[in-house]
Image (cartoon, helix red, strand yellow):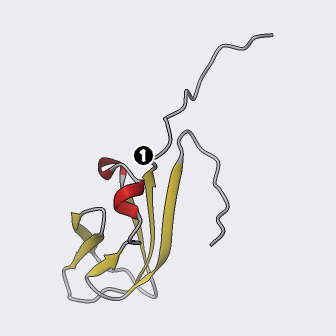
């Protein structure tokens, strides 16, 4: 596997895709890779508005609920890596 990187104020990882059921299964390696409390989830409905919400989060899956039983969303899930030391975002210039 090969990976690129997004730039931001942390060492982060993400997964994205389309979900049509109540569960998004996260990659097997996530539990050893990320800080559990750092997971954030974005959902975007496809085709029409729909009230879907996150009901449970773990390092292995995200569980969704829908008021009308329908789920058809893009998802973007981010988390901070725990296998690398956190870095200082702001620092004093040496110039």
Q: Which residue was labeled with disc 1?
A: 82
Q: Is residue 66 above or below residue 56?
A: below
Residue 4 quadrant? bottom right
Q: Is residue 90 above or below residue 46?
A: above
Q: Residue at x 46, y 88 (%)?
A: 47
Percent x, y of residue 94: 75, 11
- Of 8 and 54, the residue lying toward us: 8
Quadrant, the C terminus: top right
Percent x, y of residue 69: 21, 88
Percent x, y of residue 73: 41, 81
- Seen as rendered, the residue at the extreme right is 95
Residue 62 quadrant? bottom left
- Of 92 and 50, the residue lying toward us: 92
Q: Residue at x 41, y 66 (%)?
A: 29
Mark 1, Cα crowd under 10 Å, few <14 / some 14-19 / many 20+, is some
Residue 8 horizontal side relative to residue 47, left or right? right
How many marks the image carries: the answer is 1
Quadrant, the N terminus: bottom right
Residue 67 horizontal side relative to residue 27, left or right? left
Residue 44 horizontal side relative to residue 21, left or right? right
Q: Residue at x 34, y 77 (%)?
A: 25
Of helix, strand and loop, which one carries label 1?
A: loop
Percent x, y of residue 36: 30, 52
């Amino acid at each position: 596997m090969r990976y690129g990187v997004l730039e931001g104020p942390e060492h982060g990882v993400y997964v994205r895709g389309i979900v049509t059921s109540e569960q998004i299964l996260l990659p097997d390696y996530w539990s050893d890779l990320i800080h559990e409390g750092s997971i954030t989830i974005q959902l975007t409905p496809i085709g029409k508005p729909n009230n879907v919400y996150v009901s449970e989060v773990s390092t292995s899956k995200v569980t969704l609920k829908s008021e009308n039983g329908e789920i058809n969303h893009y998802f973007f899930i981010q988390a901070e890596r725990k296998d690398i030391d956190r870095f200082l975002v702001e620092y004093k210039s040496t110039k």
